Image (spheres, rainbow, N blue to C red):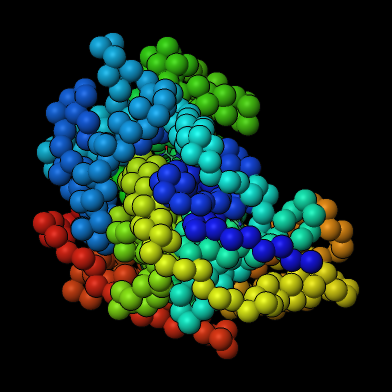
């Protein structure tokens, strides 16, 4: 039996972006949030560093400097109209959260305190600036709690532990979604006048990642399988300070508070790569610097395969008070006391710059000409506005969530109030039902766990910090083989109640799609820019590549690429020096 629900607005995902959108929609129309996780378990809760806004609370700052840093950090691929909106609206967005009760750290005078973060500078690159607003190293946790409370206050309805598997389109407009209820195994159809996807990132396709297990790209996967494009998938961010071997994130705040990266000679090697802001250069540059230090034999440890993050020079009280999670993670997972010794770190797959293409109202684009899908919206990490271009600056994601989450919530409510529910066929849930039935029928000839591990290894070895035509071609062939193997793998657990094996199988399918989209897009881009570094095309080529990649999946399973020009603005592309 399938249950059918009717709403004005349905939001898929209960992280920062989903909740911020739900809050606006919930004030205006009948709104539901459908989430595979209990809301406060969303990955936003793991964000440590903070959320930036040019409040100028502790030193001079302006939204234009913030916009300049964002565009430069993006390696000039960000759309400058979207960046201006984000940086201007940042100030009010932080103050709004403060008024909702978010417990930001304070200056002695009682203002919201601010700290330094990579790539954020004063007056167009002169020196690092204090722009990140934070609540110790639990900013994302506080954002989730605050927004969840507010949504409950506004009467937003929550369907928790519901896994969205399909998007319903009628004549090219959005008519709703289909979800699988984990507790019962039942399918639910949510008819809605507008739907917003806010399903977060998809770093789980890489072996070493800071991302939670649940970040598998389901949202972009559902949209992509319905023939809609994904944008800039080749741009994935590798964060310079993941715990050695594990990838668990140590926030950039550690360097913001004075931490230093050292190689096996004890050298502060970032002085060579970014003489002005050194360890606080943008993440793509620092990760690459680490990669080359290790490759050239200056890594630390018995295998010379990691870098040391040294916070021994930082006041112990600051470490204990402002970076408690960092201290705890180092002690718990590596048995290292950061107050006494360096912490072993490596680059870790962290953030997806690409995703579901949208305009600045969070409306989803159906093609690279910029036409929209009426009633469909996306915001947060699963979306691509694009404010982060080829490389995101730290603390700009939490900001992106609240700015474009809010805009999406307002826009989807307006659309819902001006339109009727679209008629859908009685059997709209049938493709989902057939898919699940097929997964649960017959003998399994392959282990999905082995396919997952093979995918994560291959993506890490061939398509991460450094790429070449050869590595990407190899990776693509391997992905095709893994897709075939996955096709021979069935779910052995046939029960209906909390069948996590089924959910993980479906997630893996989406992850294979994300990996393929990333590699095909990366192979076509024969230049290096931001998080996408090609050893065989080391230069950025503005004459040819100031454009966003759009990838489409055709019905026969092949992929097709299209390109959309970057929206220019005040800042002309120049060489990125820090
Ligand atoms: C360890 C870590 C630290 C970070 N620190 C910072 C920081 O300090 N500052 C900063 O700006 N950024 C930081 N980031 C990045 C930032 O936290 C994320 O980009 C952001 O939180 C993503 O928010 P979101 O709302 O888009 O998605 P998420 O918070 O990931 O939420 C995704 C939601 O989608 C739902 N969902 C997914 N798939 C389905 C499905 N199939 N069906 C139903 N629901 C689904 C999930 O249940 C979840 O509720 C950090 C990221 C990590 C991993």
Q: Is residue 58 above or below residue 215?
A: above
Q: Nearer the viewer, residue 436 or 76?
A: 436
Q: Quadrant of residue 137?
A: top left
Q: Position of residue 438 (x, y in %)?
A: 79, 75
- Residue 539 x/y as whole percent: 26, 66
Is 371 on the left or on the right of 198, as rendered?
left
Q: Position of residue 547 (x, y in %)?
A: 27, 71
Please name the residue shown 61% across and 69% down the image: 166
Q: In the rendered view, would you say 113 is above or below 348?
A: above
Quadrant housing residue 417: bottom left
Q: Quadrant of the C terminus?
A: top left
**Residue 476 visible from this viewpoint:** no
Residue that extends furthest to the bottom in the rendered view of this protein: 556
The image shows residue 43, relative to residue 475, as above or below, that is above
Q: Can residue 142 be seen in this snapshot?
A: yes
Asked whether, in this view, residue 123 is left or right of residue 433, the answer is left
Residue depicted at 25% across the width and 56% down the height: 82
Q: Is residue 457 left or right of residue 537?
A: right
Q: Residue at x 46, y 75 (%)?
A: 173
Q: Quadrant of residue 535?
A: bottom left
Q: Is residue 565 left or right of residue 412?
A: left
């Amino acid at each position: 039996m399938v249950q059918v629900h009717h709403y004005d607005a349905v939001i898929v995902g209960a992280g920062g972006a989903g909740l911020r959108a739900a809050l606006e929609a919930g004030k205006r129309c009948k709104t539901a949030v459908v989430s595979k996780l209990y809301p406060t378990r969303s990955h936003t809760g793991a964000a440590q560093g903070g959320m930036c806004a040019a409040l100028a609370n502790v030193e001079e700052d302006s939204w234009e400097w913030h916009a300049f840093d964002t565009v430069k950090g993006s390696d000039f691929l960000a759309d400058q109209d979207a960046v201006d909106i984000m940086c201007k609206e940042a100030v009010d967005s932080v103050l709004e959260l403060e008024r909702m009760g978010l417990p930001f750290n304070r200056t002695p005078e009682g203002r919201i305190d601010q700290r330094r973060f990579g790539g954020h500078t004063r007056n167009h690159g002169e020196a690092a600036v204090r722009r990140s607003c934070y609540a110790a190293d639990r900013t994302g946790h506080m954002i989730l709690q605050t927004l969840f409370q507010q949504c409950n206050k506004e009467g937003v309805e929550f369907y928790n532990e519901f896994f969205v598997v399909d998007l319903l389109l009628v004549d090219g407009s959005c008519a709703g979604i289909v979800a699988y209820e984990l507790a019962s195994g039942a399918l639910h159809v949510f008819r809605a006048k507008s739907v917003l996807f806010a399903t977060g990132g998809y770093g789980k396709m890489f072996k070493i990642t800071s991302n939670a297990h649940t970040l598998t790209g389901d949202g972009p996967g559902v949209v992509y399988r319905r023939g809609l494009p994904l944008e800039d998938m080749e741009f994935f961010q590798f964060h310079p300070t993941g715990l050695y071997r594990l990838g668990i994130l140590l926030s950039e705040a550690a360097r913001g508070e004075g931490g230093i990266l050292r190689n096996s000679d004890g050298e502060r090697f970032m002085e060579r790569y970014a003489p002005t802001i050194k360890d606080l250069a943008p993440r793509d540059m620092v990760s690459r610097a680490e990669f080359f230090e290790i490759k050239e034999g200056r890594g630390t440890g018995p295998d010379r395969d990691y870098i040391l993050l040294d916070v021994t020079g930082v006041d112990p009280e600051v470490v204990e008070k402002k970076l408690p999670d960092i201290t705890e993670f180092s002690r718990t997972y590596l048995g290292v006391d950061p107050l006494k010794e360096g912490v072993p770190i490596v680059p870790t797959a962290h953030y997806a710059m690409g995703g579901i293409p949208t305009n600045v109202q969070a409306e989803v684009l159906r093609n690279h000409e910029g036409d929209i899908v009426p009633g469909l919206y996306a915001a947060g990490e699963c979306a691509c506005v694009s404010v982060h271009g080829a490389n995101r600056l730290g603390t700009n994601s939490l900001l992106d969530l609240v700015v474009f989450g809010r805009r999406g919530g307002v826009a989807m409510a307006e659309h819902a109030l001006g339109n009727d529910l679209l008629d859908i066929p009685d059997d709209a849930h049938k493709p989902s039902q057939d898919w699940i039935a097929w997964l649960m029928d017959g003998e399994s000839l392959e282990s999905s766990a082995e396919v997952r591990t093979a995918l994560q290894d291959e993506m890490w070895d061939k398509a991460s910090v450094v790429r070449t035509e050869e590595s990407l071609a190899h990776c693509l062939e391997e992905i095709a083989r893994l897709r075939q193997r996955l096709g021979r793998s069935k779910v052995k657990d046939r029960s209906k109640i909390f069948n996590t094996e089924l959910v993980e199988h479906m997630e893996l399918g989406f992850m294979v799609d994300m990996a393929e989209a990333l590699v095909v897009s990366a192979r076509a881009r024969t230049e290096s820019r931001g998080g996408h570094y090609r050893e065989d095309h080391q230069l950025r080529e503005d004459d040819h590549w100031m454009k966003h990649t759009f990838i489409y999946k055709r019905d026969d399973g092949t992929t097709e690429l299209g390109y959309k020009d970057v929206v220019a603005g005040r800042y002309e592309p120049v060489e990125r020096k820090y």
